[in-house]
Image (spheres, helix red, strand yellow):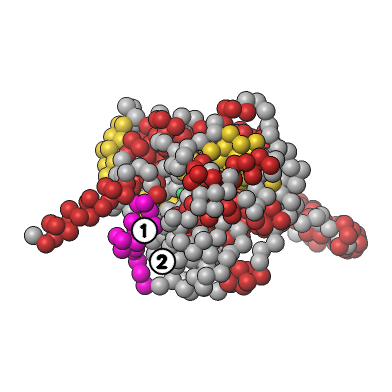
Amino acid sequence: MLHKGYGLVLATLSFVAIALTTMAVKVGTTDPEPIVRTLDSMSFVVDSIESELLVAQKKASEIDTPTSEPSAPPPPARPKNIILMIGDGMGITHITAATIANKNKLNLERLPVVGLMKTFSNQLITDSAASATAMATGKKTYNGAIAMDSKGRKLKTIVEIAEDKGLATGIVTTSSVTHATPASFYSHQPKRSRINREVSAEFMTKKIEVLMGGGKRYFMSKHRKDERDLIKELEKKGYTVVDDVDEVGSKVPRKMVCLIADMQPKGYSRRGDFLPKATAKATKILDRDKDGFFMVVEGAQIDWGGHSRNSKFIINEMLDFDRSVGEALDFAEEDGETLVIVTSDHETGGYSINEGSLKEGEVAGKFTDDYHTATMVPLYAYGPGAEAFSGTIDNTDIFFKSCELLDLEIPADILEARKKSELEGLDATTKLDSTDIMEAHGADFGSGYGRRFQKNKDKSEKQKKK
Ligand code: MG
Ligand code: ZN
């Protein structure tokens, strides 16, 4: 305000000065004396301008009281809902492969904010449990831990915090609902393997409105030592329980559990459009809550394509995941209050594209490994608060930023730990040994990976001996 007024007066002054100089020069060519006279006669103009300047300054200072100061830039927009979408094992090459296969276009391109995320756990190369725990709780932990820290304490998850505050929550995945990634958002287990029945029992103690994926047997009395019929218990608690998302038609139940497979759901070609349909249905169910919602959608089998060193497997799962991103974005665009975050827990396979054709939609991929790598993963965001996810962030930031945006209370010890160095607690182990990989992974794949892994390991050990 003050500067504007000042500037205007100064501009006027310099205009007058230029005019005077011009006049002086003109007059000066014929008679030097009038210059002084002219300047003298014009001095009152300068005087009056000076006094105007003082008045303007005074006025400006009167106007510029703190109450009338043009308000500071509006606070950044906050979302009412957050949809966190995790492509398990999805690195930049996985996205590129799907882009090539899909005529150079993905729904992912509809998200305007892009960033990179570090995926380290307490070890250089994370597994899905530790990475999901970092995103769900804001704390790095050891590989295989399901929302537990390295001292064996339970870590409160963002889903649990959101439920406490009255938000609706939901979990949708193409793995078993008890698998490492989804489990880390609502369950607490020191080890990820052979805990399916414990995880399903833990779900019964939560208020989560939507659960969709595989793992039906872990809810069935004949497959449980405690003989609890969790399906019946769910129905008693008011859940609509189905084994196909189409079963409810256009109805929007209040709470819904959809278990599409006995253990792990099949790959895309035999599973069909479960994930995009489930994503769309879940948003409708959760949107009923006026307090907002937090929802996790996982494309679980992208990772399995990487472990299997199989481009076709990766592309099918990627495109299925991308169509689910499209469903989430359609909802968010119409809703206007939903933040959609799409990222990954880690890269799988050290995947690269060395040959192919954009025209033919063909990819010839190569893999440096059949396990996870330490490579940073991409992150995309759309909607209110999306800007917070640009740049390079840590996997624990998903928790902190989401809590801040939804105004959720971060546990004091977690907030305290955040201030300490990210590297604290990182040990020297750079990679799980093969037995740990089997322990953490192979057994619960259902894709034959475990058996293949063991076979390859035996073969390479034999060759070493030779
Ligand atoms: Mg997973
Ligand atoms: Zn994996």
x and y, in percent, of residue 318 in the image: 43, 38
- Residue receiving disc 2: 123
Position in image of residue 288 (x %, y %): 73, 38
Q: Pick whichever of labels 2 and 1 is earlier in the sequence.
A: 2
The image quarter containing residue 66 is bottom right
Q: Which residue is mark 1?
A: 439
| Rendering coords of residue 270 (x, y %) | 41, 30
In the rendered structure, does residue 437 fall within the stretch colored magenta? yes
Examine the rendered structure and indicate whether residue 363 appears above or below residue 378. above
Q: In the picture, which quadrant includes the C terminus?
A: bottom left
Name the residue at 49% across, 64% down.
Answer: 190
Amino acid carrying label 2: it is Gln
Q: Nearer the viewer, mark 2 or mark 1?
A: 1
Report whether 273 appears left or right of 61. Answer: left
What is the three-letter code of the residue carrying label 1? Glu
Which element is circle 2 on?
A: loop
Residue 264 in view in this figure: yes
Quadrant in the picture for the N terminus:
bottom right
Measuring from the top left, give residue 78's x and y in whole percent: 70, 50
Classify 10 Å Cα crowding around label 1: few (below 14), some (14-19), many (20 and above): some
The residue carrying mark 1 has its beta carbon less than 8 Å from ligand 2? no
Give the magenta range. 428-443
- Within the magenta stretch, is there residue 405? no
